[in-house]
Image (cartoon, rainbow, N blue to C red):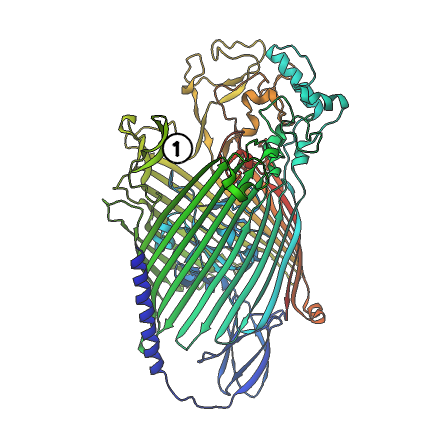
């Protein structure tokens, strides 16, 4: 694979070199000196406001400049030539060069600007009116006006069909994104991310490495026509990110910064001292025990007798603080354009020890070497730092208010509720040493050749990208953190990724016929390696992880793998008279993850048609419509859905005593399947784009259906084979939905404007086959004909009360036990009484944004909703720990006096493992931003190009029936999750619970002249 990649690179470079020489010799001509006129001017809109960044070019030449922040420009031209002035969203203006050297250019707003906008599609750009697939551009206002640390936070709730969920608010964590629901059962369902034409996914990095301030546009590709061009990588949708680049004109320096505070959006407050004492008394009464003291543990008596309590949540949390500072400089000449930026983000979390620092640098360069050759680079470096020991929120909520926080010598008490040892001090993590760091070093370059003469319209582009992604994690836990031996660990990993793409495009117009052809040959490779080391048994805590050789017992390990992908692609776009549109795409991918019994290659075709109804003659009289287009598409995409080496039978090492000596041996690990193939998804999509009343009302309606086959599932095997399971292509699912996007200009006055954006999406998936036998998989909670992710549990109908007859329904129940429906009518509650209570993913999502403008004041209010979700609630279930820990005040418990029908008695141990399924639907005031844009007269006095100040709030209030921290957040119960949480920044572990935060910031955007 590596040799193929290098051969591809050499051939492309040699071809490019020969091409440059041949074209250079053919263009040697003597330029004639003709008198040039120096022309100055200003570009304004029809309200007299300056239009910065407008393009002013001399028609028929390559000479072009851009207007500055005040709309001013200077350019040289010959008398009789024409100046072409253009800017996105305005009608292009053409001015003949005469004797007047001082021009005032007025650009009229383009009522059909949405149709003429050029948007990014896979391996190129297209006019929005020519798009046949389902491609959505994220509103520019969401990208430029929201103070976020990850661009997915800007997309959340703002794009129909894209479900972005924030399951953890750990500083520096990335939200989860799902485009058009879930097609696969076990494979990764996240979208494929491409930045400036080069993949970010599968390189080790994430969107957390991309500074939101550097992003110019984001497009989301949703249907097969749009995503098939990415083949196996496009099965879950594609997010295309384009970063900012330089423009012609003098350097423009911009500063964007904000600072603010975080706090917990909703605190699930533990019971007070009085509540805790009463709960203990009630628990002893319900369990028939004799109360000997007012509190459960002797260690709590001193504080109880003194009448002092500790607010453990307050002790474990703090005022969160966030600040971000970004400086950029951009500009350039006609032939060289640049964009350089630097960013510093510092976030102190609301839980002690949760800190995040990010430093980012970016340099984008475009150079017109000749009239036919353009080269450029996109370079960035991002350093992420998550260092520091952390407090444990779950333990803080469990602590007795009479627990002892400190020892007499000022150190943290290990067991605040001594002699209770189930719960340790939630602040012990602060006494550990933790290092968590990643760096993303990314270098992308391109060279583009435009062929002249008879080959006009033909372009060749070479893209090359390299990513180096090192990770470092290290930990030391010593005596002060309840490890009497001292434990050190270290983890170092690196990912090296290469991408080379050869892209040939050809564009041709023949009368009313327009053709665009794109061909691609690409190669990708990723190499990953890691080493681990550990030591236990240090005589003291002085050196810790810095001298692991001092540990009495030492361990080590290493890992390495390689992944490769070769691809070929062809795409043809045809348009007749801008009315009838056709797009045909086919991509062939070969992946190294598949076994020896397959070709390793898959072909993924798609076709789409579009009809611009608005351009038909019979629509000319329909003045109410500005846009009306129908789109249809059908195609196939693939998903590798398997990690490297899973098709190979492997064995793992283990230690076993032999003749009194510890000996290393091997044991079966993975049974490979060399016949594994792609998961294949066939997608149909229909869409209608519309615009009426001068586009004051515009939007789109789309419906889709996905059918996925060949799902990779583990088939159970008899253990006598030495293996418990083997992966096979055996499952099937379907997935369908409806999406609506509506934009309206409610009021469009001179001083006051009101705009609304509404998005709505519904999604329904179901499993249609599992193992080919028509049977459900109860162990994994997979049911044929039901959604992929469901809650399967007992149906709670209330709580058994004193005097009720339990004999005919649940003979083992007692007063205060949860009451469940006997669905089998056999007079007892068994596993057969479990049923599907709901689906985990939302049935529908929506977003509503209202933006108000009054002169220079702007107010944006965004409300997000997700409905139809059911989730198990760990904050309602403590099992047999209920009497040993504090519990939330708002949850309560059953007593004979209150006769609760929602909460069990303190004596109830939940032996059935009921998960307390709850309605997780919510509506949230997601963000509100108030900004003021300073007038040009003020800017002139301050000698500034632009100045905006704003105040913004995020996660302001949530409307929900959920009882707990937050319905969207994932909360882990004690002892669950990943055991290596102390080393991982975002580990899915009970030691890493982090609630939703509410943020308030003040920000400033300023540009210098």
- Does residue 986 appear anywhere in the picture? no
- Does residue 25 appear anywhere in the picture? yes
Q: Which residue is mark 1?
A: 786
Q: Quadrant of the C terminus?
A: bottom right
Choose between 509 and 497: the one closer to the eye.
497
Where residue 444 sits, quadrant-wise, is: bottom left
Could you say where residue 635 lies in the image, as x and y percent from the top left? Answer: 32, 51
Choose between 366 and 347: the one closer to the eye.
347
Choose between 284 and 636: the one closer to the eye.
284
Q: Quadrant of the N terminus?
A: bottom left
Q: Is residue 12 above or below residue 764?
A: below
Q: Is residue 309 above or below residue 72?
A: above
Choose between 569 and 801: the one closer to the eye.
569
Residue drawn at x 65%, y 14% is 897
Could you say where residue 913 lies in the image, as x and y percent from the top left? Answer: 48, 22
What number of labels is visible?
1
Q: Is residue 137 left or right of residue 566?
A: right
Could you say where residue 34 lies in the image, as x and y percent from the top left? Answer: 48, 90
Q: Is residue 352 above or below residue 158?
A: above
Where residue 391 sits, quadrant-wise, is: top right
Label 1: few (<14), some (14–19) or many (≥20) C-alpha neighbours in 10 Å: some
SS assignment at label 1 = loop
Q: Is residue 116 above or below residue 828?
A: below
Could you say where residue 755 lies in the image, as x and y percent from the top left? Answer: 59, 55
Q: Residue furthest left?
A: 597
């Amino acid at each position: 694979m590596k040799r193929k990649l290098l051969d591809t690179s050499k051939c492309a470079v040699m071809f490019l070199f020969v091409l440059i020489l041949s074209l250079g010799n053919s263009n040697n001509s003597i330029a004639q000196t003709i008198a040039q006129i120096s022309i100055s001017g200003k570009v304004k809109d029809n309200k007299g406001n300056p239009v910065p960044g407008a393009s002013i070019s001399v028609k028929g030449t390559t000479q072009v400049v851009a207007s500055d922040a005040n709309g001013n420009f200077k350019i040289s031209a010959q008398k009789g030539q024409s100046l072409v002035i253009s800017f996105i969203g305005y009608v292009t203006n053409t001015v003949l060069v005469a004797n007047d050297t001082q021009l005032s250019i007025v650009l009229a707003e383009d009522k059909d600007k949405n149709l003429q906008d050029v948007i990014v599609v896979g391996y190129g750009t297209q006019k929005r009116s020519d798009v046949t697939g389902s491609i959505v551009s994220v509103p520019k206002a969401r990208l430029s006006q929201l103070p976020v640390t990850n661009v997915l936070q800007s997309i959340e709730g703002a794009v129909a069909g894209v479900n972005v969920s924030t399951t953890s608010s750990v500083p520096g964590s990335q939200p989860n994104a799902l485009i058009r629901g879930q097609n696969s059962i076990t494979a990764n369902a996240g979208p494929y991310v491409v930045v400036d034409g080069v993949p970010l996914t599968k390189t080790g990095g994430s969107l957390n490495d991309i500074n939101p301030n550097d992003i110019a546009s984001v497009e989301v590709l949703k249907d097969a026509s749009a995503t098939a061009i990415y083949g196996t990588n496009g099965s879950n949708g594609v997010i295309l990110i384009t970063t900012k680049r330089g423009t012609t004109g003098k350097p423009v320096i911009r500063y964007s910064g904000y600072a603010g505070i975080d706090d917990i959006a909703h605190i699930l407050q533990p019971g007070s001292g009085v509540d805790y004492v009463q709960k203990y008394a009630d628990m002893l009464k319900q369990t028939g025990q004799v109360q000997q003291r007012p509190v459960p543990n002797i260690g709590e008596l001193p504080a109880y007798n003194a009448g002092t309590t500790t607010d453990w949540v307050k002790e474990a949390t703090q005022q969160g603080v966030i600040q971000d500072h970004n400086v950029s400089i951009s500009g350039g000449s006609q032939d060289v354009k640049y964009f350089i930026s630097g960013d510093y983000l510092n976030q102190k979390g609301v839980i002690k020890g949760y800190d995040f620092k990010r430093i980012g640098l970016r340099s984008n360069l475009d150079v017109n070497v000749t009239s036919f050759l353009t080269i450029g680079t996109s370079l960035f470096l991002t350093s992420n730092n998550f260092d520091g020991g952390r407090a444990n929120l779950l333990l803080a909520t469990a602590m007795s208010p009479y627990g002892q926080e400190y020892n007499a010598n000022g150190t943290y008490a290990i067991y605040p509720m001594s002699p209770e040892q189930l719960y340790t001090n939630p602040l012990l993590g602060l006494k550990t040493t933790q290092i968590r760091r990643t760096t993303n070093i990314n270098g992308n370059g391109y060279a583009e050749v435009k062929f002249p003469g008879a080959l006009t319209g033909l372009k060749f582009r070479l893209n090359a990208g390299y990513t180096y992604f090192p990770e470092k994690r290290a930990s030391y836990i010593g005596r002060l953190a309840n490890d009497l031996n001292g434990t050190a660990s270290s983890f170092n990993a690196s990912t090296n990724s290469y991408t080379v793409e050869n892209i040939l495009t050809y564009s041709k117009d023949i009368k009313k016929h327009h053709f665009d052809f794109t061909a691609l040959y690409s190669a990708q490779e990723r190499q990953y390696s890691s080493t681990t080391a550990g030591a236990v048994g240090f005589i003291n805590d002085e050196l810790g992880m810095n001298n692991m050789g001092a540990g009495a017992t030492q361990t080590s390990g290493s890992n390495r793998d390689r992944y490769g992908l070769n691809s070929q692609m062809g795409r043809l776009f045809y348009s007749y008279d801008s009315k009838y549109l056709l797009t045909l795409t086919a991509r062939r991918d070969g992946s190294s993850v598949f076994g020896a019994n397959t070709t390793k290659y898959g072909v993924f075709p798609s076709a789409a048609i579009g009809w611009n109804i608005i351009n038909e003659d019979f629509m000319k009289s329909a003045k109410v419509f500005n846009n009306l287009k129908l789109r249809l598409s059908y195609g196939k995409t693939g998903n590798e859905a398997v990690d490297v080496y899973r098709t190979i039978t492997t064995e793992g090492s283990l230690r076993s005593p032999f003749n009194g000596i510890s000996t290393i041996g091997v044991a079966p690990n993975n049974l490979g399947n060399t016949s594994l193939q792609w998961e294949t998804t066939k997608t149909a999509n229909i869409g209608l784009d519309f615009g009426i009343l001068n586009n004051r009302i515009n939007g789109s309606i789309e419906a889709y259906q996905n059918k996925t086959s060949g799902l990779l599932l583990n088939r159970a095997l008899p253990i006598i084979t030495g293996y418990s399971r083997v992966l096979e292509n055996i499952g099937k699912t379907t997935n369908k939905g409806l999406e609506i996007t509506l934009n309206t200009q409610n009021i469009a006055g001179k001083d006051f404007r009101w705009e609304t954006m509404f998005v709505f999406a519904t999604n329904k998936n179901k499993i249609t086959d599992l193992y080919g036998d028509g049977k459900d998989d109860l162990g994994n909670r997979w049911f044929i004909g039901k959604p992929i992710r469901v809650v399967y549990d007992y149906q709670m109908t209330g709580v058994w009360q004193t005097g009720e007859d339990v004999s005919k329904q649940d003979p083992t129940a007692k007063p205060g036990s949860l009451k469940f429906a006997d669905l089998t009518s056999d007079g007892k509650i068994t596993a057969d009484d479990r049923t599907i209570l709901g689906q985990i993913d939302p049935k529908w999502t929506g977003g509503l944004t209202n933006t108000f403008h009054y002169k220079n004041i702007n107010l944006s209010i965004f409300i997000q909703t997700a409905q139809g979700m059911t989730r198990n609630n760990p904050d309602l279930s403590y099992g047999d720990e209920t009497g040993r820990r504090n519990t939330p005040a708002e949850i309560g418990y059953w007593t004979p006096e209150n006769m609760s029908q929602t909460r069990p008695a303190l004596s109830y141990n939940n032996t059935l493992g009921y998960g307390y399924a709850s309605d997780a639907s919510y509506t949230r005031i997601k963000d509100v931003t108030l900004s003021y844009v300073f007038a040009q007269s003020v800017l002139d006095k301050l000698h500034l190009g632009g100045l905006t100040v704003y105040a913004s709030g995020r996660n302001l209030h949530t409307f929900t029936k959920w009882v707990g921290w937050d319905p969207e957040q994932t909360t882990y119960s004690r002892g669950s999750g990943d055991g290596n949480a102390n080393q991982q920044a975002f580990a899915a572990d009970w030691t890493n619970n982090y609630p939703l935060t509410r943020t308030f910031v003040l920000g400033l955007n300023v540009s210098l002249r």
